[in-house]
Image: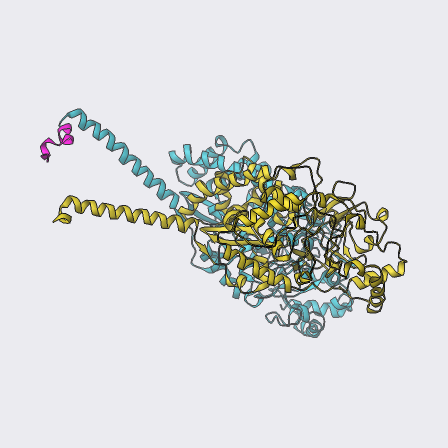
Amino acid sequence: MYSSTPKRRRLKILSWIVVLLVAASAWFGWYEFFREEPQPEWITADPEMRFKYGSIGAERDAGIPYWIFYILPRVFADKLPGPGGLMSMGVSWEMGQELPVGFTKKVVGFERVANNCAACHSAAYRVSADSNPVFVNAGGGHTLNLEAFFRFLVDCAKDPRFNADNLMREINLVTELSFIDRAIYRFLLIPITKKRLTEREAQFAWIYHKDFPEWGRGRDDAMNLTKYFMINLPMDQTFGPTDMPAIWNLKKYDAPGTTMNLSGDSHDARSVVIDSALGLLGAPPKSNDEFLQQVDWLLDYLRNKPAPAYPFAIDQARAAAGKVVFDRVCATCHMSDRTGRRMALSEVATDPGRMESWNKDNAIAANKVVTDMGIERKGLVEASLEGYNPPFLDGIWLRAPYLHNGSVPTLRALLEAPDSRPQQFHRGYDLYDPVNVGFITSGPAAERIGTLHDTRLRGNGNQGHDFGTQLPFGDKDALIEYLKTL
Amino acid sequence: MTTPSTHWLARWMTRRWARWLLVLLILPTILMLITALMVWRQLRDDQPVVYASAEEHFKYGSTGGERESGFPYWIFQAMPQVCSQHLPGAGYRSLGLIFENGKDLPIGMSKRRYQGVERTFLNCAVCHTSTVRDDPAATPRLYLGMPANTFNVLAFQQFFFNCGKDPKFTKEYVVPEIDAMMRAQGMKLGLLDRYLIYPVALALMRDRLIMLSGRFDWANHQHPWGPGRVDTFNAAKVLFNFPMHRLPAEEMNAPGDFPAIWFQGPRQGMQLHWDGNNTLVEERNKSAAFGTGTTPPTLDRAAIGRVETWLLSHEAPKYPYTIDTALATRGAPLYKTYCANCHGAGPRDFSGEQVGKVTPLDKIGTDRRRLDSYSYDLAANQSTLYAGYDWRFKHFRKTFGYANAPLDGVWLRAPYLHNGSVPNLRELLEPAAQRSKVFYRGDDVYDPVNVGFRASVAEEGNRAFFKYDVSVVGNGNAGHEGREYGTALSQEDKAALLEHLKTF
């Protein structure tokens, strides 16, 4: 009959073969490039681990193939700020862990490395020179040299040595990839990674701007990051690097009237988490539902994460005396209905760089980007900025250096008149200074590891907030003791 | 349908020239296939020389290091002839390597045919085996697992770097040398080897040696380690290509003594390495195996596993000289009072509250360089080693002191303290101020009176020993002193304690 003629039968077999081949290659393509494997349970089951190493979905678009990421610090050690591989960029790296805190590893077709919130929100401190660092989840990443990290990736990709021959040679020294994986790395992942990282150069133009000082450890120019990466605006001349903030205990922002971020730029914590996470993703989420579940988890974790207790002894009597001073001098702004609310710059008179780096139009544009992704949130405040919000002071001891731009090294220095505060100091060293309350900012180790903060440079000014600077010495001492208890 | 006789190919093949063309096409194809097969077989070739006994395997067995780092065997043999000016004396012996009778390679070097070329490189024994002479005239007695007191690893390394850079390290010099050596053994250098394999191998090896000499250049700017010592954890930083010249000065000049590595079984879980930076024997071993040229994909796990297993139960050798039993017995309670808590109850009983734990530096007071050379940055980076394998490193930790080690075979562990700064046990029981300021290391003549190696002789025949100066950075001999450490005991008590320690 119809189907039994040999020619037709042959055709039928042939078309089946074609269908199977197409299906097999589609499966192969999906398997090698898109299949997603869940992260191991030691990460997903423990909230602290999940915050440190859990994927927020950034691997899909912003992920770097694992083995490329692995060998970059070895091949391009000359492009790092110092010896020590990734450590030279001040990452929080727990001994025994394969990746630093805030670096996530996930299989999307192949293993990829990306970042999560903890990359910038993990604070390291050491109680003595002869001790190992303690890492505090949700603390401000005061050691992280984010600018160096951004530059490192771009600089590596731009280097002619970033080619398949060199990278494969190094990869083959550390692992045994299958024939197929080798081919995928050589012919696809290495060239694509080079291209993708090089493409970022234009967006990162301002971190190579000759007239802008270095952010230094523990700071980033957050609003400009938003402008150039989220809204894709052309580079302007604003510059406002600020401290990586501590993001614990976000419950405090439930208080009505509070706005978030240094200038009160955002309506609520959820919006900030969404916008920051989108920044890490580098692309719209694959699934908004999945993304928002992730956001909900983060928000829940951060709302309930308490500020860490001061790790040294506190003189309780003196602290009690300090509370009286605090209530008289500080509480008006830092423990009242003014806390976490907008305040005019003229009241605090600190460096205006951060405030000037963002405006109403930017807020409208950024909100539109997120709305267009189909994500609902209260979002950024669509109004001109006025100044800086007086912050809540929970865990203030670990928020050093102080002021929004980290221009004052210690609480003791903050209680000095602006003219008497240190003009230069090194920031990003993790040894704690319980005498001055802050981190050690001078001496050979601080100077080798830290980055120099010069308050005379743009965006770095240490003026303003001269509250309490006229207090008698004893009051200052007591006040500092009290602040340790917060 | 067409009939076979009229098929175009069949018609075509009736022409003679076409048949010839076919032959001409097929023949080269077959030849290429054969060549490809040969090359493939060559590349797959991976045959270590294996040894039946655990001892021979320890001395000459492979760790897999030849695969990535191996020297072509004949080039290795020719180098001392070609580059004799870079050696302190005649042949590899002058670097303190030990040759057993009739062996073509020193103890601590293994052989493997890999990708068609016979290669050789280091194994564990090179740093963990040495000899003892009872007197200068005596035949050296071999002890496996003891610190390689006579081996100068820095000079070994520098010899290869210097030779690699030498204008004579070319086929013009090396290949004829190989030819002559092979002839002397009744072998013949093949044409392929002469004109292709060795010239290419030499070029590759020169490239590699120049690269490595760059990465190890920091070692040229250190105070010489002398025989029996290595700057382990600065060398470990090379693995990550840390820019060594940018490291803080406090981390440099940090040599430690080669340790004895016998009887590892009871040591599992103790803080291992001088500063106690790792608690897992297998991880410590794999870490050390990087020094034998292995990389994660090339480590011969079965072979190193064999060494590992043997070392678990291979016990320290007994003291071979007379022991005054009465005196030693009198020393036993002193040992118990002063030493046992940190160093273990007895020679094979390592119980004790502080055994295998770290004593903080301010308490032990010994030279801090070795401790400071092991930085937090390094510990963090080491967690990436063996990534992708189930045995990825997870146990390296930065510490802040030196670990209390059991004392089995302590008589063979001289010189003492982590940096080998105290020549013998007798001196270790004296306060630092009374210990030798200058002595000589690298001698294998034993000194049973002071319990340690002869340390007063500068040279013997054509063999010059290493002048150890405790005032050099990293060489400090302070610490492990004071009442608690027995340095305030009476001379009689010290003598008794010393005698007791010989029983370990």
Residue A278, image x, y percentages: 57, 50
Figure check: B355 above or below B162: below
| Observer-nearest of A183 and A465 | A465
Residue A317: image quadrant is bottom right
Residue A309, image x, y percentages: 72, 65
Residue A98: image quadrant is bottom right
| Observer-nearest of B258 and B132 | B258
| Observer-nearest of A35 and A431 | A35
- Tell me if I can see residue B88 in this picture: no
Residue furthest to the right: A472
B24 vs B428, left or right, is: left
- Locate the C terminus of chain B and report the quarter of the image it occupies: bottom right
**How many labels were placed on the picture?**
0
Q: Does residue B6 belong to the magenta stretch?
A: yes
A232 vs A192, left or right, is: right
**Which colour assignment does the render follow?**
by chain
Q: Does residue A446 belong to the magenta stretch?
A: no
- Locate the N terminus of chain B and report the quarter of the image it occupies: top left
The residue drawn where x is 9% and y is 32% is B5
B127 vs A216, left or right, is: left
Chain B shown in which color?
cyan
- Tell me if I can see residue B321 in this picture: yes
Part of the protein shown in magenta: B1-13
Residue A431, image x, y percentages: 73, 55
Tell me which secondary structure the magenta stretch mostly adopts: helix
Chain A shown in which color?
yellow
Figure check: A459 above or below B418: above
Residue B194, image x, y percentages: 42, 34
